[in-house]
Image (cartoon, rainbow, N blue to C red):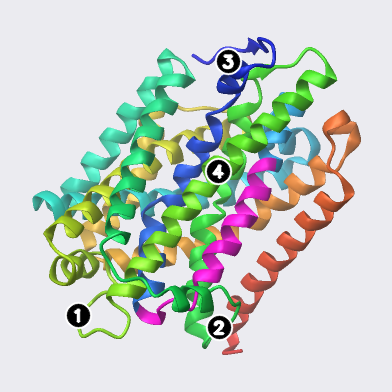
Amino acid sequence: MDTTTALPGRGLRARLLVAGPAFVAAIAYIDPGNFATNFAAGSQYGYLLLWVIVAANLLAMLVQTLSAKLGLATGLNLAELCRERFSTPVRWGMWAQAEIVAIATDLAEVIGGAVALYLLFGIPLFTGGLITGLVAFALLALQVRGHRPFERAITLLFVVILVALLSTVWQVDVSASGAVAGLVPRFAGTETVLLATGILGATVMPHVIYLHSALTQRRIVGATTDERRFILRTTRFDVLAGMGTAGIVNASMLLIAAAVFAGSAIPNTDTLEGVHAGLGIAVGSGAALAFGIALLASGLASSGVGTYAGQVVMQGFIHRSIPILLRRALTLAPALVVLGLGVDPTAALVLSQVVLSFGIPFALIPLVLFTRDRAIMGPLVNHRLTTAAAIVVAALIIGLNAFLIGDVLFGA
């Protein structure tokens, strides 16, 4: 069980005690949905959408900093504040959509783990989904011993993903000029907008906006305003390190796909199975193995984090909790149905990320409203420029989602 700790000075030990939550949050930014959208984007459009990954990662840094700060300043998480501040119909509606987002999240994570187990060991997808769910539950069981064992396990899996993908980047011929050109914001038709929204949904994850505030809310207590500001500064470095590393991982996926698959004759490279096979053909068996290992680590870690976030959301919004095993079963069921029906895994992953993107405003707008309110935040209230930047971020995301709805419904 997590415990509250007083700040032990302001040295290295204090900074290490504060650090950690951002890396748990960051695992949600490199889940199997990211693999699907980033590799699909690079395979189909080369370096064109690299700028979307960079922009989404910068947005994630801002959003996760605000979420972490909310927990530090109030001792409450975002869902709990929504329950306190909003009317009953509003908070129940917000909880309902958050649960839909949780199902979409688990869909991506479990399918990713199942595909990885199939690619690595030939395990059938349905069985692989069950295994992924069970391992995620085992990761959650580490929380009985406190937050540190869980954080260390998640961080270890994070490092596995990073090393596996960077080792592949090292082996392929990435075009420096192509990568630079990919940093210029532009689209090439509606399909690229859909993929960009998927990348955004896979990067700025709604459930982890709720989670980060829960990870910091009672972790370290500052006795004075100066101590609380010190904790906030250290938290910002934690977010920069965690989200920055996640950004490197996401960019690596697109760079690999663009360098190896864009314009090639290798088939089906917009699917996870095709990427695995294509890497084996174009780069070597080691690259295919590294991809499979990275995808498996991503599915296992992000599934555990996603289930934890679901508990935070339910407890916060409706002040109810259910046994973690039951929650694991409820969120696992839709993914197993998809796997059992034989739905294309990569298509399901990409569509799940679009669903996640539509859930972002429901978490982001309350976050901005609360963190700009001095009565709630006290001395840690947002600077006006921070609030302005957050409003612009929310408006951009909502506008992109509105465009997609119009395109789907009216062919706009």
**C-alpha distance separating marks 3 and 4:** 26 Å
Q: Quadrant of the rendered structure where residue 36 is?
A: bottom left
Image position, residue 333 (x, y; %): 32, 47
Q: Nearer the viewer, mark 4 or mark 1?
A: 1
Q: Does the magenta run of residues contain 58?
A: yes
Magenta segment, which residues? 44-65
**C-alpha distance separating marks 4 and 1:** 36 Å
Label 3 residue SS: helix
Question: Is 72 placed left or right of 388 in the picture?
Answer: left
Circle 4 is placed at which residue position?
208
Marker disc for residue 266? 1
Secondary structure character of the magenta stretch overall: helix
Q: Is residue 161 visible in the rendered structure shown here? A: yes
Query: Is residue 82 placed above or below 231 in the rendered structure?
Result: below
Q: Nearer the viewer, mark 1 or mark 3?
A: 3
- Amino acid on which disc 2 is placed: Phe
Query: Is residue 405 placed above or below 361 in the rendered structure?
Result: below
Residues under numbered marks 2 and 3 in contact, where contact means CB atoms less than 8 Å apart: no
Residue in the image at 19% along x and 80% along y: 266
- Amino acid on which disc 3 is placed: Arg
Q: Residues within 10 Å of mark 4 (few under 14, many from 20)?
A: many
**C-alpha distance separating marks 4 and 2:** 28 Å
Image position, residue 162 (x, y; %): 36, 47
**C-alpha distance separating marks 1 and 3:** 51 Å
- Amino acid on which disc 4 is placed: Val
Marker disc for residue 13? 3
Residue in the image at 57% along x and 12% along y: 3
Q: Is residue 329 visible in the rendered structure shown here? A: no
